[in-house]
Each structure stands twice: as C-alpha cells, then as structure tokens.
Image: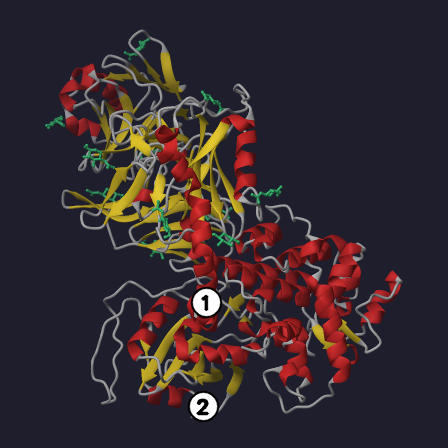
Amino acid sequence: MGYFLLFPTIFLVFPLVSGLTSSGLVQPNFNASYNAFIGNNGTFLFSRNNTFRAAIFSPGAQKSFYLCVIHAESNTIIWSANRDAPISESGTVSLTSKGLTIADEDGKIRWSTPPLKSSVSALLLTDFGNLVLHDRSNASLWESFHYPTDTIVIGQHLPVGASLSSAVSDDDLSSGDYKLTITTSDAFLQWKGQTYWKLSMDTKAFVNANYAAEYMAINGTGLYLFGNNESVVVIEVFLPLSDFPIAQLGTSGMFTVSSYTSDNWLQEFSGPDDDCGIPFICGPIGFCKYDSSSSNPICSCPSGFHGGLQNTSGCLPSDGSYSLPVSCNSTNKGSRSDPSAFSYLWLGNGSGYFSNSFSQPVKYGVNVSFCKNLCSMDCSCLGIFYGNSSGSCYVLENELGSIMSVDPTDTNLAGFIKVLGGSSTTNFSGTTSVSGQRQAVPVAALVLLPFVGFFLLVALGFLFWKRCGLSKSKEKISGRCNSRSSEDLEAFYISGLPKRFDYDELELATDKFKTQIGSGGFGAVYKGTLPDKTVVAIKKINNLGVQGRKEFCTEIAVIGNIHHVNLVRLKGFCAQGRQRLLVYEYMNRGSLDRTLFGSGSILEWHQRFDIALGTARGLAYLHSGCEHKIIHCDVKPENILLDDNLQVKISDFGLSKLLTPEQSGLFTTMRGTRGYLAPEWLTNSAISEKTDVYSFGMVLLELVSGRKNCLLQSQSHSIDDSASGGGGQSTTSSGSGLVYYPLFALEMHEQKKYLELADPRLQGRTTREEVEKLVRVALCCLHEEPALRPNMVSVVGMLEGGIPVVQPIIESLNFLRFYGRRFTEASTVLERNDGSTSFPLANASRSTSDLHNGFSYISSQQISGPR
Ligand SMILES: *[C@@H]1O[C@H](CO)[C@@H](O)[C@H](O)[C@H]1NC(C)=O
Ligand SMILES: *[C@@H]1O[C@H](CO)[C@@H](O)[C@H](O)[C@H]1NC(C)=O
Ligand SMILES: *[C@@H]1O[C@H](CO)[C@@H](O)[C@H](O)[C@H]1NC(C)=O
Ligand SMILES: *[C@@H]1O[C@H](CO)[C@@H](O)[C@H](O)[C@H]1NC(C)=O
Ligand SMILES: *[C@@H]1O[C@H](CO)[C@@H](O)[C@H](O)[C@H]1NC(C)=O
Ligand SMILES: *[C@@H]1O[C@H](CO)[C@@H](O)[C@H](O)[C@H]1NC(C)=O
Ligand SMILES: *[C@@H]1O[C@H](CO)[C@@H](O)[C@H](O)[C@H]1NC(C)=O
Ligand SMILES: *[C@@H]1O[C@H](CO)[C@@H](O)[C@H](O)[C@H]1NC(C)=O
Ligand SMILES: *[C@@H]1O[C@H](CO)[C@@H](O)[C@H](O)[C@H]1NC(C)=O
Ligand SMILES: *[C@@H]1O[C@H](CO)[C@@H](O)[C@H](O)[C@H]1NC(C)=O
Ligand SMILES: *[C@@H]1O[C@H](CO)[C@@H](O)[C@H](O)[C@H]1NC(C)=O
C-alpha cells in the first residue's frame, strides 16, 4: 500500500522512470502536463504489458494537446478525451478522488469525467486500451470504452444508439462530419444526416439472423453485430486472422478495419469499398471517377461546371451569371426566393449521388418538371436526381456532396443542380453552352425514344433471361470446376464456388433419385443424405445442356456466395457431362404452400406474420443487399421453404440466369403455371425488382386468407361464411361460385371490413389492426404501376412498424376488377380437364389448377397474345 501512496510523487520527480508507469495505474492527487512528461513524449501511464500508453499528446505540429490512449507500437491514437477542447503544452490532466479533469494553462476546465457514484481510488490503463476509473473495491466507475471517439478495438462494444464520429484531420482530433451509428438491425455511415453506407448491404457482410442487434464489436477474425448478449451473430464480416485489428472511421469518412502486423497497418475491410462512395471526396459538385489503372479516385468537374482553387473545394457553374443558392434550415429560414428565380443545370450523363441508393425518393411517378418545382419551393433543396423510368424524384438537401461517376450509357437517372440567376442581359451565344446542357435531356429523350422502343420489343423474348437473376460475376480464382468426363478436360478456377459433387455421389445420396420431394420449372427435387449424414435437397436441372459448364459455374459461384438467414443455402453442385445438379440445405417443413394450404395443423397468425416478414427480408436482401441485384422472378409459396422453427428460406433465386437465351422460351411455358406474375410480364414494360414486389403482395394475401388467391368456392372455406357478417354480396362472388380473392381484398379494404379477409380457420385469433396492416401492404405491392409499388426494404419497414403503412392507391388497383371479371367468366366456360397445357386460353382444354395458378395474366394473354 505504501508503495502506491508514494507512487505519484516519485512519478512526478522522476518522470523518466518508465518501469513505474508499467504498473498500469495511477492514484488520485496526480497531475500531468506535456511539459512535465516531455522526456517521455507526454506519456504518463503504460498498460501493464506496455501495449498501450496514455499520453498528453499533440498529433500535429500546431501544439494542440489531447489526453490520448495510444497503441504504443504503431503510435496510433485509439481514444482521446478532450477531442473538441485541446489544451496547450502546459495544460494539466488531474486525477482526484472525484474523477479526471483536463484544464488549460489558465486553469479553465476544458473536459472532465461526469459525476461518479463513489470516490476514485485509481486510474487504470488495461492491456486492451481501456482507461478505467476504479473505486476502492475495484469496481469500475467510468471507462473510456464507453465513450468511443472514432475507433473501436478488441474488447470494446459499440452499443445500439452509440456512434463513432470521424476526426476533422490527422492533426485535429475534433469531431468531423462523418458518423458511424449502430441500430438494432444495421450499422450506418452518415454524412450530415445522409446515409452513404450500410453494413448489411456491403458485399462482404453476411446477414446471419433477423435478431435485434445490441452492439458492434471486432475480434481477431471479424467484425460483428451481436445480439442477445453475444449469443447471436446478427451480421458478420469475416477477416483474416490478426492479433491487433482496429475498426476506425477515418477523417475522409471511410470506415476501415485494419490489422497491425510487423510495423505495418494492413487494411482488411473498408466501407464504402469505393472511394467515390464517400460523400465529400471531391468537394461539393466535384465529380469522382475511379481510375482503375492507379486505383485512385480522380476528381474533376461535371460538364457545365469548373473547378475551384483546389480539387476538394468543389465545382461552380461555368457560366458566372449563375450562383449556387444557400440552403436554409430550421434555425435559418433564409430569404424565400421566388421559385421561378431558379433554374437547373444538368450534371451530364453518368452522374450519380451517394445517397440515392440509401434514401427513398420524395415522390414517385412524377415528371421532371414537377420534381424541379418541388425543389424550387423548398429552400433546403439544392438539387435533384430524377429517375426517368419510375418517375422518382430525389432531392439533395442542406449540403451538396460530390457526384459519383456511374455507367454513362444508363440515361435513366439524371442529376440537376439548382442555381440562381442567369443574367437576362447575357446574349444568346453567352448562354448557349449552359442552355444546351439544360436541354440535353429532353432532346436525348426525343432522339432515343424510337430506339428505346425498338430495343424493348426486340429484347422482349430475352427479357427474363436478361433482366432476371444475376449479372455475371466478375471475380475469379479459387474453387475448381472441372469434369472427369473426357468431352472437355479443361479445368478452370472460379472464386467462391461451393463444393463440387460427382454425379455418382449424388446418385448414391438420393438412392438413385428415389424420393422426389418437389418439382419446379427447372426440374425435379429429390431428398438425399450425404455420407456425413447431412440431409440435403438435390435439384436435378432439366434442359440445360446448351449452357457451357464454365458459365454455369460462374453463376453458381454467385448464388453460392449469397448468405442470408432467409435465403436457402446452396451447399454444392454437380456439373458433369450434361448433368447439372444443385445441392441445397434441406428444409424439414417443406414449402409454404403445403403448410399454408395443407390439411395439417393451421398456421397461427403470428407465424404467418413472421413468414411474411422473413420473406420480405430475404427479397430485400436479394434486391439490395448483395453485390449483384438479383430479381427472383418466381416468388410464390412453393419457393418459400420453412425450417423446423418456421424460419423462412427462399429458394430458387438466381436460377433464371442458368438458362441460355435460346432456353428463355422455357419461361414462356413456365409462365403458364404461375399465379403470381405482375401485369408488366404481359404488357411490354421492363421487368424490375418491383415485379417480385407484386408477387410478394399476392403471397401476402394468401397468408391472410390461408387459401389460393384463385380458387373455386366449393374447394375452399366458404367465403360466404366469413363474409356473411359483413352483409352485402360482393361482385367477386358471382353466380359461378368463383371468387378472385385479390379483388375481394380490394373491396373489403374499400369497405374497411378487414376481418372478413382473415382465414376463417383462425376463428378470430387475430386482430383487425393486424389484418388491415397486411392487407394494406399487400394492396400497395399489387399496384399496377410498378413505380407505385414500395420497394422490399420499405415493405420490411412497414411490416416491422418502423415505416407507416401507406394507403393503397385505388386507381392503380382497378385492374383487379377486370381480372376478377375475366376470371369468373373464364371459369364458368371451361370444364375441368387434367390434360394441362401452358396456355389456358389458347386451348380448349385446361386444368382448373392451371386456371387458378395462371389466372392473373389471363386477360393480358388475350390482349397481347402468347409470345
Ligand atoms: C494539481 O493541480 C491542481 C491545479 O491544477 C492543484 O490545485 C493541485 O494541488 C495539484 N496537485 C498536485 C498533487 O500537484
Ligand atoms: C518521442 O517521440 C520521438 C518522435 O516521435 C521519438 O523519436 C522518441 O523515441 C520518443 N521518445 C520516447 C521516450 O518515447
Ligand atoms: C497484452 O495484453 C493483451 C490482453 O491480454 C494481449 O492481447 C496482448 O497480446 C499483450 N501484449 C503483449 C505485448 O504481451
Ligand atoms: C484491486 O486490484 C488490485 C490489483 O489488481 C488488487 O491487488 C487488490 O486486491 C484489489 N482489491 C480489491 C478490493 O479487490
Ligand atoms: C470472434 O467472434 C466470433 C463470434 O463470436 C467467434 O466465432 C470467433 O471465434 C471469434 N474469433 C476470435 C479470434 O476470437
Ligand atoms: C450477458 O452475458 C454475461 C456473461 O456471458 C453475463 O454475465 C450477463 O449477465 C449477461 N447479460 C444478460 C442481460 O443476460
Ligand atoms: C488533389 O490534388 C492533389 C494535387 O493537385 C493530388 O495529389 C490529389 O490526388 C488530388 N485528389 C483527388 C482526390 O483527386
Ligand atoms: C443552419 O444553417 C446554418 C448556416 O447555413 C448553420 O450554421 C447551422 O448550423 C444550421 N443549423 C442546423 C440546425 O442545421
Ligand atoms: C408534369 O406533371 C404535372 C402534374 O403532375 C403537369 O401539370 C405538367 O403538365 C407535367 N409537365 C410535363 C412537361 O409533362
Ligand atoms: C448522353 O448520352 C446519350 C445516350 O448515350 C447521348 O446520346 C448523348 O449525346 C450524351 N450526352 C452528352 C452530353 O454526352
Ligand atoms: C423517360 O421515360 C419515358 C416514359 O417512361 C420514356 O418514354 C422516355 O424514353 C424515357 N427517356 C429516357 C431518356 O430514358
């Protein structure tokens, strides 16, 4: 004890005796300043094993001193106390029984620990780099780990609600403009409140569980979002094994995980993975393009703009008569200008904006002049991005960031910067360049229109093949995809390829394909048992002989690399000779159609809700969570598998890309057995992820009703039973006894009689509010106009409750009335017949199941004819 009492004095007198500092603690009535510890470079405390030091340190030349925790070997600051209030070289850090305070040389307190529960008996620096105040019983009173700055290290938790904030520069540790924030489902990077990166959407992140996260942490093998007290990994990023990794939000806004080995920092992970994804990399309106030869971002100005003094000071309109308006906010209302005083400068082809992928448009389905007008009315709006195909209007608010370079041939998205003025006195030639810019979009649209239309028509036959599924994987190396058959001996390497099986192995596993458990558009599915006793589902793909094995393997590598708790895992494949087989994890409960429509025990309401949410999450991940956007194209209960805990696993995603263009005709046939196809399959509109949203809406309605959307009344739970309380017969229940349920849902929505829609087998074990929620979300998903359908991320938000459920737009649902009529008419004419064909109305004979399944497009078949 005596030793510890003496310690501070000894320390002050002999600051150079570093052996003492290694005790890892100091006790109260201790003062330190940089000047007093100058011989030690300001260091007054080492952790026990000298990994970390606590120092009064100035990172730059300008003598601003901070109390820092520093990784000794690499000289890396992992924490600073007074980041926003630096002191001079003679400012003091004092430890008293009340806590730590930092005062400048004038004695003014610049920083202190909050009031503590009991008096301090020691200040410790742990071997993990945590600065801790202990009381007499060694209980922690305060820890620097609970007040993170811009870095987390092993052992530190960044809890939900907490954030890291970047330093202004390497010399100035004060809080900069970038923030990393943890929520219960994700980690976000934001710049002035605008999101520019999400961990869950990073290609290296695996979403493991739909569980509320509690904190972010790193260890030697990865970066994690943990839930349920570390027992659940919600999201993980696997990293190479390292002794000392740190996760840091850099001054530029890049979040990185680096590891220190042999005098070097090695960057293992970065988000965003491309520098041009950083909001302010080239200053306001600076145009960032990634140069692959130097692997550096290059800043320039969009056409019509010229550079400021330095490359990061951004760009200004080239025409000096234009000026950029100043944004207003709640505290500074700004002078309201006349909306007509503004004009808009086009940013040119190939312009994108960092926040577009992370924010919702403020409006859908409007024209560009409407969008500009919206911006002109709003003094905080500084520019817009307009998505032509969906009529989406994105506004850039408060502060302009840099412009990202995107594919210049994709002219769908156009960016405009709001400007003031444009002198009326300028003569014609003086403004041509700018007005030419401004007119370029409509002119381009006019010129392009015939080409676009023509292309659409030509492309239609290949639409599914082209639009659906995956784009080609760019990665290479690792994973062997070769064949033992002599027909081609070439072996090639493709990254991330799952396990390759021999045909014989799979034949053995399935006992010569004995137990068929399903069949789909791509072929039959068999149950099998691998030698290690794992039960698997093996899909034997038909009709794929044309596609080369290398192409097949490339696609398989992409599918095999998709990890999400709501997507079924591809465990392996076989590509031997003409055989193509896929090996999936086996789902005990089979597919949703069996559980939902089957005669076994019924699904309770909360289970249906969880299935809806799980399906929505899986689709949201396919649409926006992985490197290549994947449109499922075949969302239906048969493809929604359930595990023992009724956890959803969507199957069959990405398979459309396994077809060659020649085989795309197969889809034409397959469409005949589908019941969830959006109207745009039949009109000539483009297929997009919104096509999946429509199918999801159909599935949602089936979850509510517990029956197929189109079903003979006699085969179903009588709709009249459930509707009887509501009185008035709906037009859906026609004399034929057939009900088109989506139309019934629309009508009950209009009459606010939601409970009539619920599965009668539930016998009231649900609430009106919950049914209303699902039905409203479902109807929004069914909007005829794809742009009016919410995206899957919003659907997840609505189901979770984070986003309010919007009102369905009746005008965009009126097509259901037409479908409903066609449905009942058609059904009365055609008798049951099991010699099924794919094109119901093109043939006199058809099965009722085809009628039911394929119904939603019957009317359009007649309009456009089979293709
Ligand atoms: C520490 O500094 C404070 C003023 O900054 C002074 O009041 C106190 O006596 C000093 N303590 C020691 C042990 O030097
Ligand atoms: C102090 O810092 C200088 C430069 O960073 C370094 O050369 C010197 O070794 C350090 N001295 C001590 C005692 O750590
Ligand atoms: C210091 O202790 C930490 C935590 O126990 C350990 O991870 C690290 O390897 C140690 N460093 C040295 C140099 O012994
Ligand atoms: C507090 O910790 C020190 C050193 O780690 C130890 O010697 C001491 O016994 C502890 N005291 C209590 C009350 O646990
Ligand atoms: C890191 O944490 C994960 C998840 O808890 C664990 O599986 C892994 O083994 C840990 N790695 C190390 C090096 O401790
Ligand atoms: C979390 O786990 C730790 C140790 O594993 C335990 O001490 C603590 O009580 C747990 N907390 C909760 C809330 O379960
Ligand atoms: C900015 O300019 C400097 C020198 O002119 C150059 O070294 C740097 O790479 C440029 N930065 C960007 C992002 O282009
Ligand atoms: C409002 O804008 C002014 C300057 O444009 C800025 O100084 C202030 O911080 C802003 N206030 C808020 C709440 O964003
Ligand atoms: C844009 O839409 C608005 C209403 O939404 C309409 O009044 C206006 O005429 C449209 N402008 C053009 C150029 O189509
Ligand atoms: C923009 O792209 C379109 C189509 O690719 C092209 O016709 C037009 O000339 C381009 N405009 C400019 C200014 O490059
Ligand atoms: C914009 O969309 C309209 C209708 O959606 C289309 O006719 C036009 O060709 C599109 N223009 C461009 C440039 O893509």
Amino acid carrying label 2: it is Phe
Q: Is residue 776 left or right of residue 693?
A: right
Mark 1, residue position:
468
Q: Secondary structure at mark 2?
A: loop
Q: CA distance from mark 1 to mark 2?
A: 30 Å
- Within 10 Å of disc 2 (Cα), the crowding (few <14, some 14-19, many 20+) is some
- The relative height of residue 624 versus residue 571 in the rendered view (above or below) is above
Quadrant of the rendered image containing residue 123: top left
Ligand 5 closer than 8 Å to label 2 CB: no
| Percent x, y of residue 650 | 51, 68
Q: Residue at x 31, y 87 (%)?
A: 577
Q: Secondary structure at mark 1?
A: loop
- Within 10 Å of disc 1 (Cα), the crowding (few <14, some 14-19, many 20+) is many
Q: Is residue 850 left or right of residue 358?
A: right
Viewer can see residue 419: yes
Mark 2, residue position:
513
The residue positioned farthest toward the top in the image shown = 106
Amino acid carrying label 1: it is Cys
Front residue of 5/695: it is 695
| Percent x, y of residue 157 | 40, 42
